[in-house]
Image: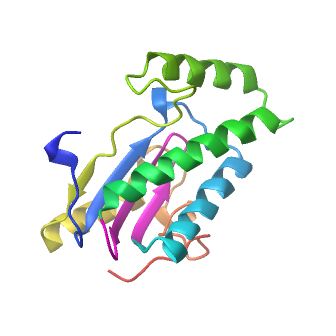
């Protein structure tokens, strides 16, 4: 991993990670709920301190830190666990019209991966940027909340259900 994206214990980070091939995977509630359930697990059991987030159809953004340990270790574990779970959910979902296409795509990417894995759901990088100033933190906070607006999904940040900008967000975040 590049030194540029490594995390240190106790740091506050802007993190982005995306589905391999930028596929719009998180368009179905079952996949969204699975991500949320696993973020909650990380908050409750792994010490994830989430300050801001947005789940888009093909990627996630967080402002986060970890109580103990390195955020990259948590991200690695989160992505590993959720990738296996998402493959299972896709395979079992009778409403998934793209089932064969998705599984074939993720299998092909896994075969090409240097890690030699059966499926690759997530891109390998995390793009973790240390937020070293209040200006940087505010800029990333606004960027995260404006993401669904800029993508044309909603008119106002608080209208996106899967964002900390929404007062009825399914995830609780800490105050900045």
User: Residue 109: image x %, image y %?
Assistant: 50, 20
Determine the residue positioned at 22% across, 69% down. Answer: 11
Q: Which residues are magenta?
A: 51-69
Determine the residue positioned at 40% across, 68% down. Answer: 52
Is residue 161 visible in this depiction of the protein? Answer: no
Between residues 151 and 175, which one lies in front from this camera angle?
A: 175
- Quadrant where the C terminus lies? bottom left
User: Residue 130: image x %, image y %?
Assistant: 19, 60
Determine the residue positioned at 46% across, 43% down. Answer: 151
Between residues 171 and 5, which one lies in front from this camera angle?
A: 5
**In terms of image quadrants, where is residue 25?**
top right
User: Up-down: is 54 above or below 67?
Assistant: above
- Left/right placement of residue 87 relative to residue 155 reads right
Would you say the magenta stretch is mainly helix, strand or loop?
strand
In magenta segment, residue 64? yes
In magenta segment, residue 157? no
User: Up-down: is 120 above or below 33?
Assistant: above
User: Up-down: is 161 above or below 171?
Assistant: above
User: Residue 9: image x %, image y %?
Assistant: 23, 68
- Quadrant where the N terminus lies? top left
User: Residue 142: image x %, image y %?
Assistant: 32, 63
């Amino acid at each position: 991993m590049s030194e540029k994206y490594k995390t240190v214990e106790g740091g506050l980070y802007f993190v982005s990670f995306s589905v391999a091939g930028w596929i719009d995977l998180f368009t179905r509630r079952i996949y969204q709920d699975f991500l949320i359930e696993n973020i909650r697990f990380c908050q409750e059991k792994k010490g994830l301190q989430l300050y801001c987030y947005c789940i888009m159809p093909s990627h996630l953004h967080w402002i986060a830190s970890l109580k103990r340990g390195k955020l990259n270790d948590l991200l690695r574990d989160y992505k590993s666990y959720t990738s296996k779970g998402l493959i299972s959910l896709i395979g079992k979902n009778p409403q998934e019209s793209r089932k064969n296409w998705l599984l074939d795509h993720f299998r092909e990417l896994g075969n090409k991966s240097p890690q030699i894995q059966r499926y690759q759901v997530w891109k390998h990088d995390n793009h973790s940027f240390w937020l070293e100033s209040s200006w940087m933190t505010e800029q990333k906070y606004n960027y995260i909340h404006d993401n669904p607006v800029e993508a044309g999904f909603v008119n106002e940040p608080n209208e996106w259900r899967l964002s900390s900008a929404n007062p009825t967000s399914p995830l609780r975040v800490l105050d900045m």
